[in-house]
Amino acid sequence: MIDTIQRAMVIAPHPDDEVLGCGGTIARLAALGRHVDVVIATRGHAPRFDTAQVEQVQAEARRAHALLGVARTHFLDFPAAELDRVPRAELNAGIAALVAQCRPDTLFLPFMGDLHFDHHLVFDAAMVAARPLGAHYPARILAYETVSETNWAAPYLAPSFQPNIFVDISSHIARKIEAFGCFASQVRPFPNERSVETLRALAQVRGSCVSREAAEAFILIREVA
């Protein structure tokens, strides 16, 4: 699959989701000379979020993306943790505009069953943006997993993450961990799930599923070959 990707777009509800779910894949694609855009769909707004904290997290994201080799980061301004108050048409249009502008052949999206409702709404909006209409639309759509979101949904009541695509990141796990370390405001000590140890352990578990040292797991939503 990696060989067929030329222009990828990773859409993240919040800063660090893209690194948690796709950091190793981003690094691998960049090392191959492929173009990767990252879209951060939301921004913290006062009074729920402190302005200085928001600026810090965005600066952390820029440093992490530079390490991974992201070609361009797009920060949208939709309100974090309040996406359910945004008209669906506005969210759809904001994401659709970037998909049309960047013309990725592959989209990486948050899993629709994640506990955080922002993730679900971003997934839906991206699927609207990626509708297979006309000659140009993403040929491939994959959903990634986010620790502390994907695995916390109610079992049997919400969709479960059952991956069918595994990307070998054995040569890029160190870069992924380093990129996550850029998020000083988000990294937590183990055994918190948003810890370096947990991120490395998940990559090892996903890798062991396919006899690799480390991997990232995805659900293939659609592919047009």
Image (cartoon, helix red, strand yellow):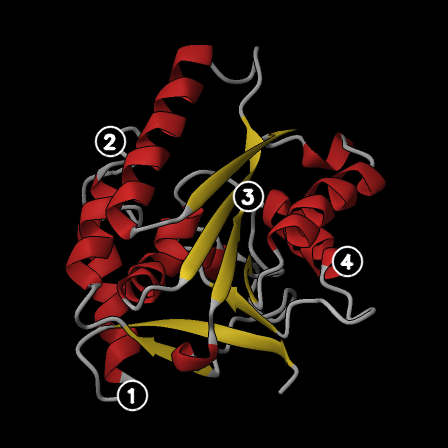
Query: Real-space Cα distance between discs 3 and 4?
Result: 16 Å
User: Of the numbered discs in the image, which one, if any, rests on residue 13?
Assistant: 3
Residue 158 coordinates in the image, percent (x, y): 63, 64
Q: Residues within 10 Å of mark 3 (few under 14, many from 20)?
A: many
Which image quadrant is residue 91 in?
A: top right
User: Of the numbered discs in the image, which one, if any, rests on residue 210?
Assistant: 1
Quadrant in the picture for the C terminus: bottom right
Q: Give the vertical position of 47 relative to 208 (above or below).
A: above
Q: Is disc 4 placed on a helix, strand or loop?
A: helix
Quadrant in the picture for the N terminus: bottom left
User: Of the numbered discs in the image, which one, if any, rests on residue 128?
Assistant: 4
Residue 73 coordinates in the image, percent (x, y): 46, 40
What's under tag 2, amino acid-wise?
A: Ala
Q: Residues within 10 Å of mark 2 (few under 14, many from 20)?
A: few
Query: Real-space Cα distance between discs 1 and 3?
Result: 29 Å
What's under tag 4, amino acid-wise?
A: Val
Q: Nearer the viewer, mark 4 or mark 2?
A: 4
The disc, 4 or 1, on the residue closer to the chain's N-terminal end is 4
Q: Give the vertical position of 179 relative to 160 (above or below).
A: above
Q: Is disc 2 placed on a helix, strand or loop?
A: loop
The disc, 1 or 3, on the residue closer to the chain's N-terminal end is 3
* Residue at the spot of label 2: 184
- Picture residue at 82% right of the left edge, 69% below the top: 133
